Amino acid sequence: MKRFKLPTAVACLIVLGSSVAFAAGYEKVPDRDPTSIAANPFLAGAYGFIWVALLVYVVIVARGLSKASNEVKELRRKLEQQS
Amino acid sequence: MVQHTMPPTSTPPKPATLGVFLLGVAVCILGYAWVPQMIVGAPIEMTMGPVQKIFYFHVPCAWLLMLSVFVCAGGSVAFLFKGSERGDRLARCSSELAVLFGLCVLVTGPLWGRVAWGVYWQWDARLTSSLLLWLIMVAYLLARQYGGPASRKLAAALALFAAADVPLVYISVHIWRTIHPSTSVVPTLAPAMRAVFWTSAALFTVLWFVLLSFRLRLERLRNEVDELAIEVEDVLEVRMETKRI
């Protein structure tokens, strides 16, 4: 059951994202200049998202590296003891 | 009697490789501090206003998405036709970067579009083909993660499909009438904007190389864990048999 959690979460995200995008794509745009929308929150949001995404990825890989290094050490120790 | 030796895949990085890696990390940290200041100081575009500054990281992310897909496809070709394990490892690692940078493109683009076009999303050719490319790469990762060893060839074929989509994404703005800006924007940038753009693109590319080498090291360590686990199991089996005799 645990192994299906991630694909289910990804599928839900895709369906949710597509639905929101689909709805937004056909929403009537109010008759106003689009550049009148405050741009700074969007700019900060976009920049912030990139760095949070990269940081999360680096943390995931670093944790994986640390776990794998420990496993290699442990297995080498076992092998040395047994041979 | 079976002879057991330690697997030869001990992977301490060479000093030169480590030096290049640390240099890359230093460049990334400098870029992290410096690029935002450059972007804030860049000239404001006349028609779109400050939101156009998303361009300075949206386009480098799109370029890295395409690079990752091509590297993934190259590794997959090496695996499919030569059985190269290194190619397979490279393909898997770069596919993760394709999904990561693709996600950045698909999030920053709609944020820019909301201000510039008035909507987050339009089902036009550039946006739809980019979404399709990202979904193919997500399918690649899911196949690798949950499909078992047999899925490696299937995933490699998916990577080739993704690579075939990349030129389509690039030329879509010329073939179809789309709301997305064309590829002629970068060569016609004002000099002050051009400097910021190319600095940002170069730093993002260095970051990509650092992340790829970081991820490749993890993949090599995981392979080593698998080989050592098999080795330990073999030794245990031999011991049990010897005891029985």
Image: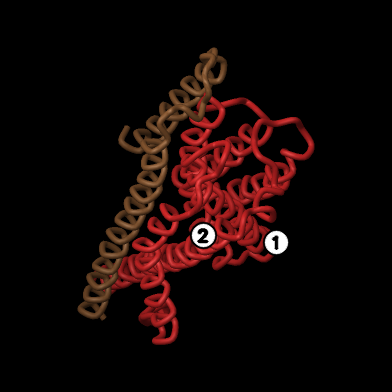
Disc 2 sits on a residue from what chain?
Answer: B
Q: Which residue is mark 1?
A: B81
Question: Disc 1 is attached to a residue of which chain?
Answer: B
Residues B15 and B48: in front is B48
Label 1 vs label 2, nearer the camera: 2
Q: Nearer the viewer, residue B177 or A74?
A: B177
Residue B8 falls in which quadrant of the image?
Answer: bottom left
Image coords of residue B21 (percent x, y): 41, 75
The percent position of residue B134, horizontal first and vertical second, equals 55, 41
Reading the image, the residue beneath label 2 is B196
Circle 2: element type:
helix
Which chain gets the brown colouring? Answer: A
Quarter of the image where one finds residue B13:
bottom left
* Relative to B183, A46 lies left or right: left
Going by the numbered disc 1, the residue's amino acid type is: Phe
Check if mark 1's residue and mark 2's residue have beta carbons within 8 Å. Answer: no
Residue B3, image x, y percentages: 39, 82
Which chain is displayed in red in the rendered image?
B
Amino acid type, callout 2: Val
Please say if B116 is above or below B219: above
- Which residue occupies the extreme bottom position in the image? B15
Mark yes or no: residue B88 visible: no
Whether residue B176 is situated above or below residue A80 in the rendered picture: above
Q: Residues within 10 Å of mark 1 (few under 14, many from 20)?
A: few
